Amino acid sequence: MTTTENVKKVAQVLTVAGSDSGAGAGIQADIKVCAARGVYCASVITAVTAQNTRGVQSVHLLPPDFVSEQLKSVLSDFDFDVVKTGMLPSPEIVEVLLRNLTDFPVRALVIDPVMVSTSGHVLAGSSILSIFRERLLPIADIITPNVKEASALLGGIRIQTVEDMRSAAKSLHAMGPRFVLVKGGDLPDSSESVDVYFDGKEFHELRSPRISTRNTHGTGCTLASCIAAELAKGSSMLSAVWVAKRFVDDALEYSRDIAIGTGMQGPFDHFFSLKKNPQSSRCSTFNPDDLFLYAVTDSRMNKKWNRSIVDAVKAAIEGGSTIIQLREKEAETREFLEGAKACVEICRSNGVSLLINDRIDIALACDADGVHVGQSDMPVDLVRSLLGPDKIIGVSCKTPEQAHQAWKDGADYIGSGGVFPTNTKANNRTIGLDGLKEVCKASKLPVVAIGGIGISNAESVMRIDAPNLKGVAVVSALFDQVCVLTQAKKLHKTLKESKMEN
Ligand SMILES: Cc1ncc(COP(=O)(O)OP(=O)(O)O)c(N)n1
Ligand SMILES: Cc1nc(C(=O)O)sc1CCOP(=O)(O)O
Ligand SMILES: [Mg+2]
């Protein structure tokens, strides 16, 4: 028996779904992803499937009364933050779910309208469509259909383009859910995986490179459960959706070549983050192309222009910045932490990574995506051991020796400068374009150039012949300006043009 004084609240999800004997999808995937995201997951089983990596051999529906028994057991006992549904194979089972949700109201409901398995087996037929449309969708916080499921829910309309996905998302939103995510993984002929998110007012297209692997069984269940897990921890909806998309991409990337089973639909590894080796092919959320337009904030400039850190970051992202670093040299710890937490939320909602300059403590406290450290800050190997394998670590290097060490220590990227003289950082040694080239040549790591860079000279930087030079990091060119948004847009355009010319 626990007393109320010493209880520690644990984020909790309930999944109501089918069992997959191969453990790639269904209940088994849901429990794994929640565990990987640090969330407790209870399970109510609606059906038991006999399936493996070759397909679904047989499906056994549990009696609705017994599904109801399970729902009552857990809903009357646990304090769920989110209920997530997967395979709801009959109208009777949907009916008992609805009844239990009336008896035990929940805070958030994530509906993954599972209808057909990856192998093409029907898991819930057309008989469930009307109860879904009329009773379940109107109470959902988010629904996550793929294009086939979206089409079925909308009476069989054709969905073949991103434009079709947008109008499908709008029509589904009109049926009542607060948010809609139409997953475009099945769209033909695309090098990208594009998901369309609609909140009733705005659309967001969530894009990522398509990962070529046979190990995709369970991606839908994983995505929906990861959204549920992030919501349970307190994320906003858009931020939860971005985190879930990145989680699935990272898991697929890590599991690209694993071999489990002999069929065409292999499972992937939900616990990849426990296994990654910092020295080798780490596949954190870091994409080197994110270094393209790297915005570094400055507390003095924000003060001078009477701008909050949040407004500065919002404008930089809207203008096309692809990664943000909070470099608040003069901020008090408490004020910095509050600003950093708000910026983490904004960045997550826009799929942009947020790093903290120097302050490992702040990065840990606000769950930032990583840190940037210099040669006189905490050593990279120690930062890695404090932050773990998933976080992004950047390190400043002025020499080939430092660049070589950065890779050995497990950094993700190098910031190299000052390329040109700067007024932003006192007594900074300028290394010039030649110094930048030497650093790039000495390392396998991606490099971002920094120091005195702006619209007038960004092209000369991007033109140096170094494939691992990924972009420019700027402070005053964005933040010591009347309008951050306008300057970010202009710089983004200049960078894009010089990239196309290369
Ligand atoms: C992207 C990037 N590159 C270099 C730096 C400089 O870091 P550091 O040498 O630690 O100097 P301070 O920024 O702490 O003054 C950076 N911040 N970002
Ligand atoms: C923070 C920082 N680091 C540098 C380095 O050489 O490592 S130069 C620099 C300041 C960059 O500011 P601006 O874009 O205003 O010149
Ligand atoms: Mg530093």
Image (cartoon, rainbow, N blue to C red):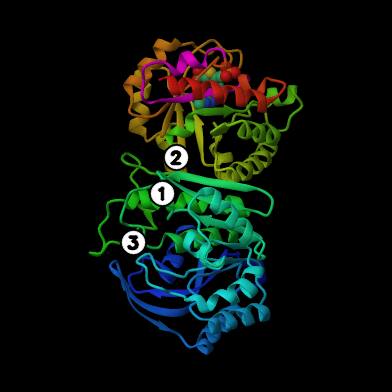
Q: Residues within 10 Å of mark 2 (few under 14, many from 20)?
A: many
Q: Residues within 10 Å of mark 3 (few under 14, many from 20)?
A: many
On whether ligand 1 comes within 8 Å of the CB at mark 3, the answer is no
Element type where label 3 sits in the image: loop
Q: CA distance from mark 2 to mark 1?
A: 10 Å
The vertical placement of 354 against 248, above or below, is above
The vertical placement of 475 against 223, above or below, is above
Residue 75 coordinates in the image, percent (x, y) = 60, 78
On whether ligand 1 comes within 8 Å of the CB at mark 1, the answer is no
User: Which residue matches tag 2?
Assistant: 286
Residue 44 coordinates in the image, percent (x, y) = 50, 77
User: Which residue matches tag 3?
Assistant: 267
Q: CA distance from mark 1 to mark 3?
A: 14 Å
Disc number for residue 57:
none
Is residue 406 shown left or right of residue 205? Answer: left
Mark 3: amino acid: Pro
325 vs 252, nearest the viewer: 252
The vertical placement of 458 against 351, above or below, is above
- The answer to if 461 sits in the magenta stretch is yes
Is any part of residue 415 visible from this angle? no
Residue 415 coordinates in the image, percent (x, y) = 46, 24
The vertical placement of 160 against 295, above or below, is below
Q: Work out which quarter of the rendered image holds the C terminus and state it.
A: top left
Q: Residue furthest left?
A: 262
User: Which residue matches tag 1?
Assistant: 250
Is residue 412 shown left or right of residue 280? Answer: right
Element type where label 1 sits in the image: helix
Magenta-tinted stretch? 456-476
Element type where label 2 sits in the image: loop
Is residue 127 shown left or right of residue 54? Answer: right
Q: CA distance from mark 3 to mark 2?
A: 23 Å
